[in-house]
Image (spheres, helix red, strand yellow):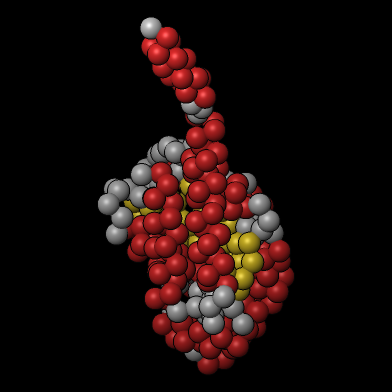
Amino acid sequence: MANVKEKNAVNDTLAYEIPVFSEESNNLYLAHQIEKGLKTIIEEDMRSGQPLFINIKPGFIKKIALKIVSEPAARILIGVSGESASGKSTLATKILDICLTDKHKNLSTLITSDNYYKDASEKLKVAGSYEALFEQGFNLDEPQAVDLDLLKNDLRKIKNGEVIFTPEYNFFTIESIPHKIRKTPAKIILTEGLFVLEDKLKELLDISIYVHTPSDVIKERWYKRAITRGKEGKVADMLFAIVNEGAKKYIRPYAKDADIVISGITSEGYIKKIAAKIKDAIRECID
C-alpha cells in the first residue's frame, strides 16, 4: 500500500510540473522560431558576395513574425518602391513566382501602381507630340501624376477581402482605361511602383521595401526600357532628366523610412532562391 501511495505521489508531482501553454505563449514561441529562421537567412545572405539585403529596420523581423502567428487569417500587404528602372518590378514578380508555386491556393496577387497613372491622352493630342507635351511640363515622375486616392481605396478593399478591378495604363498613348484588370484577394498582396511608399499609402502597408540601385545601372536600364515604350532620342533624354530630378525629390527619401532596403543589382535567380527560403522558413513554423 505504501508503494502505491509513493507511486501516486510521484505521478501527482509530475502532473503538477507539466507546464500549461496558453495561446499567447505558443504564439510567442512560434514567432521566435520564425524570427530566428529569418535572421539566419538574412545573415547568410549578407555574408555572400552580392547580398540582397542592404538594411533592415531594428525590430522589424520580430514585429512581422508576431503578426504572422497572431493574425493567421490577416492579409499581408507589401509595398515595393524604388527609382524608375531600379528593379522593383523584378523583385515583386519573383516573389510572386515563388508564391504561385506554393501548394496553398490564393497565396498572392500583384497590383502595379503604373496602372493608376492619370489619363493624359487628350493632352498629348493637343500638344501634338511627346516632346511638346514634356516641354509644357508634363511629368510622370511626381506623385500628382498617379491617382493615389484610387490606389489606396483599391488596396484597402482587396486587403479586406473584396475583388477589385484596377485601371490599365497605356504608356504609348498615355491613356487610362478604368475597371480593366480583375484582382482577387490573397494572403500576400504585393503593390509596386514609384510612389507606393507615400504617406497616404504607407499606413496600409505591413511591409515597406525600398530597392536601391546604383545610378549608372538605372540609367542603362532606363534607356533600354524607354525604347520599348516608344521614346528615343531627344524625347528620351528630356524624359530621363525629369526622371532623375523626380527620383531625387520624391523617391530616394523613402529609403530612410522603409522596413527593408534591398539591392537592385542582385540576379533574378538569387532573388527567387532567397524568397523561397523565406517562404519555407515561415511554413516550417506554422504548417
The C terminus lies in quadrant: top left
Residue found at the very far bottom of the displayed protein: 233
How far from the left and from the top, in percent, is residue 15?
46, 20
**Residue lying furthest top:** 1
Instruction: Identify the residue at image location x=50%, y=48%.
Output: 33
Residue 34 in percent (x, y) is at: 50, 50
Q: Nearer the viewer, residue 133 or 104?
A: 104
Left or right: 196 in relation to 282: right
Image position of 38 (left or right of 137): left
Q: Position of residue 185 (x, y in %)?
A: 38, 45
Q: Is residue 24 above or below residue 285?
A: above
Count the marks: how many?
Answer: 0
Q: Nearer the viewer, residue 47 or 211?
A: 47
Whether residue 159 can be seen here: no
Q: Nearer the viewer, residue 37 or 130?
A: 37
Q: Is residue 43 visible?
A: yes
Q: Residue at x 44, y 38 (%)?
A: 72
Residue 219: which quarter of the image? bottom right
Residue 174: x and y in percent read 47, 69
Quadrant of res 171 = bottom left
Quadrant of the drawing holding the N terminus: top left
Q: Is residue 25 left or right of residue 57?
A: left
Task: Identify which residue, 156 or 141, lies in the foreground.
Answer: 156
Which residue appears at 57% of the width and 67% of the height?
43
Vertical position of residue 81 compared to residue 157: above or below: below
177 versus 229 height, above or below: above
Residue that appears at 70% across and 74% down: 248
